[in-house]
Amino acid sequence: MRIECTRHVDASEPDEDGAYDYHYEYDIYRFANEALCLIARSYVDEADEAHFLNVEEHGRARLMRPADLRHPLFIEAAAHLRTAGKQRLRWLSGRGDGYELVP
């Protein structure tokens, strides 16, 4: 498994007092093998949580499916995140509020 982690900041321009209308800082994780890549995000202010967002299969992005949770790459990626302190893992299913807990 190859792991890539990049830090991102999404923020408005600061006002004259240096305050922001919005400011989000997060890490994007890419867990890859030869055929699959899993994308996850973790916000800095929710350091114990991460969300699996989608799958890239042979270079094409798609939504995650329940079967993906049993894939060896997913199991290894979830273990890596938990070791890094991300104890609350969720995945973007599109149902309910959009996210479900990883079993």
Image: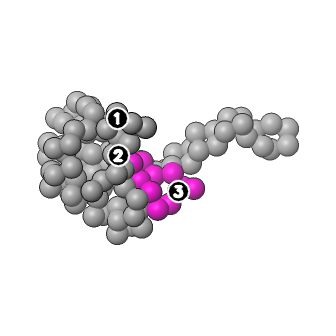
Q: Looking at the picture, tell me which residue is in the foreground, 70 or 21.
A: 70
Between label 3 and label 2, give the one nearer the viewer.
2
> Does residue 23 appear left or right of residue 81 in this picture?
right
Secondary structure at badge 3 equals helix
Q: What residue type is labelled 3?
A: Glu
Is tag 2's residue or tag 1's residue first in the polypeptide sequence?
Answer: 1
Tell whether label 1 touches label 2 (CB within 8 Å). Answer: yes
Q: Looking at the picture, tell me which residue is in the foreground, 56 or 48.
A: 48
Q: Can residue 40 be seen in this view?
A: no
Q: Which amino acid does label 1 sit on?
A: Arg
Q: Specify start and end residues of the magenta stretch as a single range.
A: 41-53
Secondary structure at badge 1 equals loop
Q: Which mark is residue 100?
A: 2
**Within the magenta stretch, is there residue 30?**
no
Q: Determine whether 12 is above or below 86 in the image.
A: above
Q: Determine whether 11 is above or below 1 in the image.
A: above
Q: How crowded is mark 3: few (under 14 residues within 10 Å), some or many (20 or more)?
A: few
Q: Mark 1 points at which residue?
A: 95
Q: Mark 3 points at which residue?
A: 46
Tell whether label 3 touches label 1 (CB within 8 Å). Answer: no
Q: Residues within 10 Å of mark 1 (few under 14, many from 20)?
A: few
Is tag 3's residue or tag 2's residue first in the polypeptide sequence?
Answer: 3
Q: Which residue is drawn at 43% across and 37% down?
A: 97
Q: Distance between the residues labelled 1 and 3?
A: 22 Å
